Image (cartoon, helix red, strand yellow):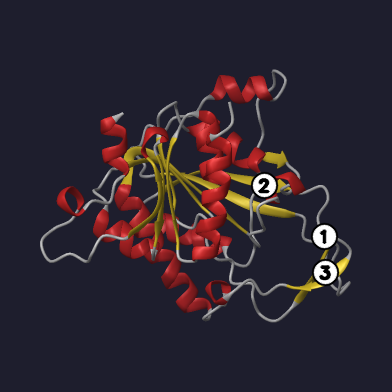
């Protein structure tokens, strides 16, 4: 256990060099369960406070750059799509530069045989796919996450958006990535699991502590973690939001480090993690 916790720490003594920036704020930590939340910019934290080859798996739900003043439908009501300053586009070139930077930081801390999963819509996923290939990752799959109860399109000028893409990539062409083929086949009633996953968005019970505008369903993260990690693996979420990744890790016996800039979402994460750890 001591080795597990040490690997996830961003401690000045062991993971920094002389003259490096101050360690990030540890917002929440449950050492006995290997759960940790860090407050700060993920690029800075990963570049300056973690050793290379630290994490077995990364799940990333980066900004989709959709907050442009538009509207959408939620629960039968017209609502704004603006999620916050972190989701505002700075233009195609700057958005892509950001994707290159955080993916480069993630690749440095990913173990040689580790994998990364990134979710996105059409607005950002092509930039991310190009960035992955540019940095030397090996794309393994593109998962199509189908939402059977997707919100209608209010403008009636487009097909209704009912999917997101989740890219799965290994660190390099030489990586020997982990894939639990037998378990995925078992979960799919004895047939090979395909890359089209029908999973409903988060239920109300997953949001009883509050909402994050891009919260992912627990079922999606549990499947991802079971498919690509073993018990005890160390998992990173650099844009953790409400920490669905962390909740899944806690339930499945994986170690977890989540990073976010906004305290309100870190507080939401903390409450969710405390709830799941207090369960029998």
- Observer-nearest of 39 and 80: 39
**Measured from the top left, where is residue 221 in percent x and y?**
59, 41
Q: Determine the CA span between mark 2 and mark 3.
A: 19 Å
Query: Does residue 118 appear in the picture of this structure?
Result: no
Residue 225 screen position, x and y as percent: 52, 35
Query: Do tag 1 and tag 2 residues touch (Cβ < 8 Å)?
Result: no
User: Is residue 139 toward the left or the right of residue 69 in the image?
Assistant: left
Numbered badge on residue 158:
3
Horizontal arrangement in the rendering, residue 207 relative to residue 97 (left or right)? right
Which callout, 1 or 2, points at the residue further toward the start of the chain?
2
| Mark 2 residue crowding within 10 angstroms, few (<14) / some (14–19) / many (20+) | some
Distance (Cα) linking label 1 and label 2: 17 Å
Image quarter where the N terminus lies is: top left
| Separation (CA) of disc 1 from disc 3 | 13 Å
Q: Nearer the viewer, mark 1 or mark 3?
A: 1
The residue lying furthest to the left in this view is 18
Contact (CB < 8 A) between labels 1 and 3? no
Secondary structure, mark 3, is loop
Quadrant location, the C terminus: top right
Q: Position of residue 66 (x, y in %)?
A: 64, 72
* Residue beneath the point at 67% across and 54% down: 164
**Residue 179 in sight:** yes
Tell me how many marks there are. 3
Residue assigned mark 1? 151
Residue identifier under label 2: 144
Q: Residue at x 52, y 81 (%)?
A: 90
Q: Residue at x 49, y 58 (%)?
A: 239
Horizontal and vertical percent for residue 93? Answer: 47, 78
- Residue 253 drawn above or below residue 112: above
Query: Disc 2 vs disc 3: Cβ atoms closer than 8 Å?
Result: no
């Amino acid at each position: 256990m001591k080795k597990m916790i040490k690997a996830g720490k961003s401690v000045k003594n062991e993971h920094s060099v002389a003259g490096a920036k101050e360690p990030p704020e540890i917002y929440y930590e449950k050492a006995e369960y290997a759960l940790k939340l860090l407050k700060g910019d993920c690029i800075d934290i990963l570049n300056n406070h973690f050793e290379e080859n630290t994490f077995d798996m990364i799940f990333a739900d980066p900004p989709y750059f959709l907050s442009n003043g538009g509207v959408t439908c939620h629960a039968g009501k017209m609502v704004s799509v603006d999620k916050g300053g972190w989701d505002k586009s700075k233009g195609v070139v700057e958005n892509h530069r950001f994707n290159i930077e955080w993916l480069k930081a993630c690749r440095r801390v990913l173990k040689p045989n580790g994998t990364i999963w990134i979710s996105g819509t059409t607005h950002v996923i092509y930039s991310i796919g190009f960035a992955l290939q540019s940095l030397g990752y090996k794309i393994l799959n593109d998962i199509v996450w189908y939402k059977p109860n997707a919100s209608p399109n209010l403008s009636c000028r487009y097909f209704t958006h009912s999917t997101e893409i989740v890219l799965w990539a290994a660190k390099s062409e030489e990586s020997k990535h982990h894939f639990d083929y037998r378990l995925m086949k078992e979960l799919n009633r004895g047939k090979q699991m395909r890359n089209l996953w029908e999973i409903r968005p988060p239920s109300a019970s997953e949001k009883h502590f509050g909402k994050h505008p891009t919260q992912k369903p627990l079922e999606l993260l549990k499947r991802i973690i079971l498919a690509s990690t073993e018990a005890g693996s160390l998992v990173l979420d650099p844009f953790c939001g409400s920490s669905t990744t962390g909740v899944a890790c806690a339930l499945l016996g994986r170690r977890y480090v989540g990073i976010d800039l906004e305290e309100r979402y870190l507080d939401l994460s903390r409450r969710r993690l405390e709830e799941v750890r207090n369960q029998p």
